[in-house]
């Protein structure tokens, strides 16, 4: 079994989806509070724009792009598969494919236009951010499926902190480059977290049903 039973998963999934839904509703309705927060953060990052910063954030946004996230996850899948963890490898494949489908469906449903005055070209709709969604899935995969193999707790905590910092940096890069609004990147992390928890629950339910059926034979 990849995951252990945990009652907190249901509450986490419920909390994430409720907050995400409320955020989505406020975005669709052009809520003044959300728009105010978006513009305030954009103005702060706008004052930081410079050629060196743009070069750094452009590199970060490339490394955190959906294409790179797929490559990272495929590499993790391959390594786990080779090491005999086939269940974990296949589960990552499932969450990668299904998650991207869900993120795409949300994009074409909300149809939020991207910010004006983009620093680098960006096409498609703005909500949610594919960069942050994919990066969140990569980081959750590393934290829950890879890091437990590291026995040293201090090392594990340091790596976990660096991974979370990377997610924040990728999110900031998308707002800095005006590829997304701040609420887009927050919504993306919430959506990825929701789907991760839901997939864990689906896995545990499926695992239990297989276990029960095998006992009855």
Image (tube, rainbow, N blue to C red):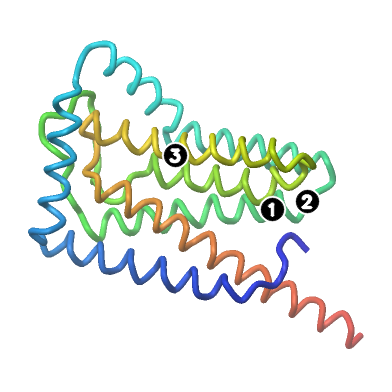
Count of numbered marks: 3
SS for tag 3?
Answer: helix
Contact between marks 2 and 3 (CB within 8 A): the answer is no
Task: Please identify the residue farthest to the front as the structure is shown.
Answer: 154
The dot on residue 90 is 1
SS for tag 1?
Answer: helix
User: Is the residue marked by circle 2 packed among few (<14), some (14-19), or many (20+) residues within 10 Å?
Assistant: some
Contact between marks 2 and 1 (CB within 8 A): the answer is yes
The x and y percentages for residue 21 are 30, 68
Give the answer, above or below, for where 25 lies relative to 126: below
The x and y percentages for residue 18 are 35, 71
Identify the residue shown where x is 69% and y is 35%.
155
Distance between the alpha carbons at the discs numbered 2 and 1: 6 Å
The residue singled out by tag 2 in the image is: 86
SS for tag 2?
Answer: helix
Distance between the alpha carbons at the discs numbered 2 and 3: 27 Å
The residue singled out by tag 3 in the image is: 167
The x and y percentages for residue 16 are 41, 66
Side (left or right) of 188 relative to 53: right
Give the answer, above or below, for where 63 lies relative to 88: above
User: Is the residue marked by circle 3 packed among few (<14), some (14-19), or many (20+) residues within 10 Å?
Assistant: many
Q: Quadrant of the N terminus?
A: bottom right
Identify the residue shown where x is 58% and y is 34%.
72
Distance between the alpha carbons at the discs numbered 3 and 1: 24 Å
Q: In which quarter of the image is the C terminus?
A: bottom right
Q: Which circle, 3 or 1, is nearer the viewer?
A: 3
């Amino acid at each position: 079994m990849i995951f252990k039973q945990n009652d907190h998963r249901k509450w986490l999934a419920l909390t994430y989806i409720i907050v995400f839904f409320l955020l989505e509703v406020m975005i669709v309705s052009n809520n003044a509070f959300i728009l105010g927060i978006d513009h305030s953060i954009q103005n702060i990052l706008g004052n930081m724009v410079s050629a060196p910063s743009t070069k750094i954030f452009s590199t970060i946004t490339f490394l955190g792009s959906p294409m790179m996230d797929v490559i990272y996850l495929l590499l993790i899948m391959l390594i786990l598969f080779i090491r005999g963890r086939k269940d974990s490898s296949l589960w990552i494949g499932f969450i990668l494919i299904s998650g991207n489908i869900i993120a795409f469906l949300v994009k074409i449903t909300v149809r939020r236009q991207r910010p004006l005055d983009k620093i680098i070209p960006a096409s498609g709709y703005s909500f949610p951010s594919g960069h942050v969604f994919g990066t969140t899935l990569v980081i959750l995969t590393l934290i829950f499926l890879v890091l437990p193999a590291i026995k040293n707790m201090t090392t594990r905590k340091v790596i976990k902190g660096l991974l979370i910092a990377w997610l924040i940096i990728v999110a900031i890069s998308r707002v800095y480059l005006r590829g997304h609004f701040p609420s887009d990147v927050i919504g993306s992390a919430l959506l990825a977290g929701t789907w991760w928890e839901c997939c864990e629950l689906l896995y545990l339910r499926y695992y239990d049903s297989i276990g029960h059926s095998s006992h009855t034979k």
